[in-house]
Amino acid sequence: AKAEGRNQCKFYAPVMNESVQHRYSIESRLRNALEHGEFLLHYQPQMDLRSGAVIGIEALLRWNSSEEGLVAPDRFISIAEETGLIIPIGAWVIAQACKDNKSLQQAGVPKLPVSVNLSARQLTPSSLIAAVEAALHAARLLPTFLKLELTETAIMSRPEEAHGIFLRLNEFGVKFAADDFGTGYSSLSYLQRFPMGQVKIDKSFIQDVAHNSNDAAIAQAIISLGHSLGMTVIAEGVSSPEQVEFLRARSCDAIQGYYYSKPLPLAELQAFLMPDCQ
Ligand code: C2E
Ligand code: CA
Ligand code: CA
Ligand code: CA
């Protein structure tokens, strides 16, 4: 799966390298993509390290472009953010993730929270709260089966707005996770103000965790910090048995990464979650 990812990067490099003048054309292509239903979600399952059970799924956006095939988010999210298109695209992601999660539940899959990534630009209280409530209502999904992933960078770019959103939706029953944890500058202070249920150790610390003592120390510190704040700790980008052993030995709660599963289309995820039915 790693080799696949690398090929994808090469193949889609032109999208990323578009010059500033061509950003407009990407913008209009993204607008078109939204109108013509070219976005889809893949889902990556998360595994509890003690029981081996699936504990959640993360929705990851893909663009099925007529010109380029399946395009990964790193190629277009930043342009969507700069142009503000991330707001309608993000609302579509929230609605689709709720809908897909409900359909998994109706198929008899054990109920799991679905995690959705939010960009800073989406942290406008009135529109985000409305989008979340509308999505839950339309899908008839309980709020507790939706989790919002916020990075420190997003929170710190709009701390007041983020806090209002957090308080309101948290009270409503929606869950939160601190994404890409450890990569920002004021990580310790924001966790106090945003008592989220879950902290996700960024994959940049996991990559060499079994061999690099600095990365190991950071991962260990995040696990201790998370636990002492009553949070569950999940490691991102876990792809090897050595990483799993390291994390298990240090009481990390859960993992997400190619070791367990790559992100899957909904039908494949359902098969993954219900192996007996295949
Ligand atoms: P992220 O939130 O940190 O998501 C995890 C990324 O790591 C995903 O990349 C996932 O496919 C990749 N990954 C999973 N397991 C492994 C592994 O074992 N090794 C390695 N090296 N990578 C692994 P993806 O799907 O390309 O998404 C990239 C980023 O795009 C995400 O990073 C997130 O920040 C952003 N993104 C994705 N979907 C959305 C969305 O709906 N809205 C917004 N605003 N951002 C999104
Ligand atoms: Ca994430
Ligand atoms: Ca990350
Ligand atoms: Ca991220």
Image: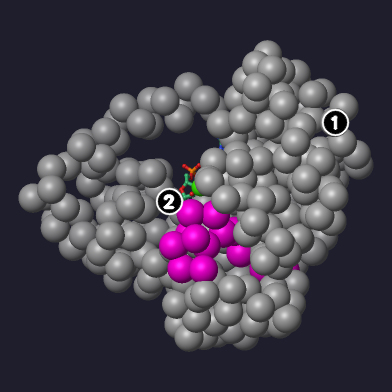
Report the front residue among 190 and 196: 190
The residues bearing labels 1 and 2 have C-alpha atoms spaced at a distance of: 34 Å
**Residue pictured at 82% horizontal, 60% vertical:** 110
Query: Where is residue 81 drawn, in percent x and y?
Result: 33, 60
Going by the image, does 109 lie left or right of 41?
right
Taking the magenta stretch, the answer to whether it contains residue 147 is yes
- Name the residue rendered at 79%, 64% in the picture: 111
| As drawn, 32 above or below 224 | below
Image quadrant holding the N terminus, namely: top right
Q: From the viewer's perspective, is 256 left or right of 130? A: right
Q: Nearer the viewer, residue 152 or 42?
A: 152
Residue 55: give its label: none
* Magenta region, residue range: 145-159
The residue closer to the viewer here, 255 or 229, is 229
Residue of label 2:
62
Cβ of mark 2 under 8 A from ligand 1 = yes
Q: Residue at x 14, y 56 (%)?
A: 25
- Residue 260, horizontal then vertical, whole percent: 71, 34
Q: What percent of the width, then of the height, locates residue 72?
A: 40, 44
Residue located 73% across and 55% down the image = 198
- As drawn, the residue found furthest toward the left would be 21
Q: Is residue 257 shown to the viewer in this render?
A: yes
Determine whether 172 is above or below 6 in the image: below
Q: Amino acid at mark 1?
A: Arg
